[in-house]
Amino acid sequence: MITNSKKIIEQLNKDEEQILTALQKNSKDSINSIAKYCGFSRQKVKRILTRLEKDHVIFGYTAIIDEKKQGRLKYVLLIKRSMNKIDKNTAEKIAYQMYDEDYEKQGITIESSYLIHGEYDWMIIFTSPNLRDAKKFSTMLIENYPNIIMKINLMQILHSPKTHHIISPTPEYLLEFL
């Protein structure tokens, strides 16, 4: 037999999932719109959002930008690290991403950065004004972290049909390649 407290927790989880789904569809929606979409009161949505932010389940709200319209190109950089020991300062520099400012001066905007499992260990998604600057960024990483990076693979993203749960408003870009 399921206890009342277990039922309450299950319902809270379902409520959170509904709100998270609404946020993923459009994080710019007002609390009133989210409440209407979920069938909740405004106060309930505000309370759940506050708790999700406090618990770092959700953090940051962002806009999805069409880099082509900004005259920028998007890249994926895959990094395979060596098995050499990393000193504490370097590890902290990587973990706390103290490198962003240096790369922004080079025209690089890091969109996402991931620790991954597989052939490669790290993935960075970034934009750059051109291929030359993207390659400079790759080289700069190797120079900044000597004996740590074993291999780098740079790839250009030609089109994202769907990003962060949002379908691209420019499907014609994909038609060029199909």
Image: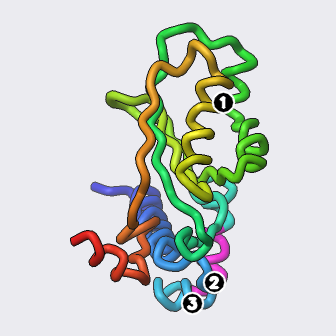
Image coordinates for residue 175, horizontal then vertical, percent: 27, 78
Residues marked 2 and 3 touching at CB (< 8 Å): yes
Identify the residue at horizontal 35%, vertical 80% (top origin).
171
Mark 1 nearby-residue class (10 Å; few <14, some 14–19, many ≥20): few
Q: Is residue 55 visible?
A: no
Label 2 to label 3: alpha-carbon separation: 5 Å
Name the mark on residue 33: 3
In the figure, is residue 56 to the left or right of 18? right
The mark nearer the N terminus, 1 or 3, is 3
Residue 92 lies left or right of residue 155; in this view the side is right
> Which residues are the magenta region?
41-49
- Type of amino acid under label 3: Ser
Q: Between label 1 and label 3, give the one nearer the viewer.
A: 1
Expressed as whole percent of the image width and height from the top left, the position of residue 144 reads: 68, 25
Image quarter where the C terminus lies is bottom left
**Residue bearing the label numbered 2:** 31
SS for tag 2?
helix
Under circle 1, the secondary element is helix
Q: Main secondary structure of the magenta part?
A: helix
The residue singled out by tag 1 in the image is 94
**Could you say which is closer to the camera, residue 124 or residue 34?**
124
